[in-house]
Amino acid sequence: MLWRISFWLCFGLTAYLSLLPQEFLPSGINIWDKLSHSIAFAALALSAALGWPEKDFVRSVLIPLLLFGILIEVLQYFIPGREFSLLDMLADAVGIFIVWIGIRVLQTVSAKAT
């Protein structure tokens, strides 16, 4: 239950910060922009995977989060001071895939240990 709450809090915070006009963002955030994208989407992927462990990661987490990242970028096109960015989408995907790879490694190690 805690992981599900964590997911929804991360989801809301990510959407909120991603859709704020540039003038309302804290200064200096652009320096870490791509890293913050990867961290945010890794946090989303990890909390979703832990919150709903019975779900298939690719269909229930990876694909929806990739679509969420694309949606954010499309919406940013219409927000003053923001822009559509393929690099931001790539950074989102990197965060998601890092979690997916980690889960796969842990599953493999766990299967070999039994």
Image: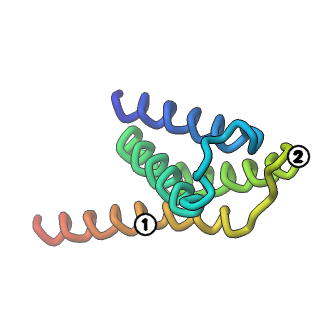
View extreme (front): residue:
27
**Residue that badge 2 annotates:** 78
- Residue 33 falls left or right of residue 2: right
Classify residue 103 by image quadrant: bottom left
Q: Where is residue 70 in the image (x, y as percent from the top left)?
A: 73, 56
Q: Position of residue 84 (x, y in %)?
A: 80, 59
Mark drawn on residue 85:
none
Q: Which residue is drawn at 63% across and 68% down?
A: 90
- As measured in the structure, the alpha-carbon distance from the residue carrying label 1 to the one carrying label 2 is 30 Å
Residue 62 located left or right of residue 75: left
| Residue 26 x %, y % | 61, 42
Q: What residue did someone put label 1 on?
A: 98
How packed mark 2 is, by other alpha carbons closer than 10 Å (few <14, some 14-19, many 20 or more), is: few
- Of the residues shown, which amino acid type is indicated by label 2? Phe
Q: Does residue 76 appear to the left or right of 10 in the view shown?
A: right
Q: Nearer the viewer, mark 1 or mark 2?
A: 2
Tag 1 secondary structure: helix
Residue furthest to the left in view is 113
Identified at 68% across, 69% down, the residue is 87
First in sequence: mark 1 vs mark 2? 2
In front of the other: 20 or 5: 20
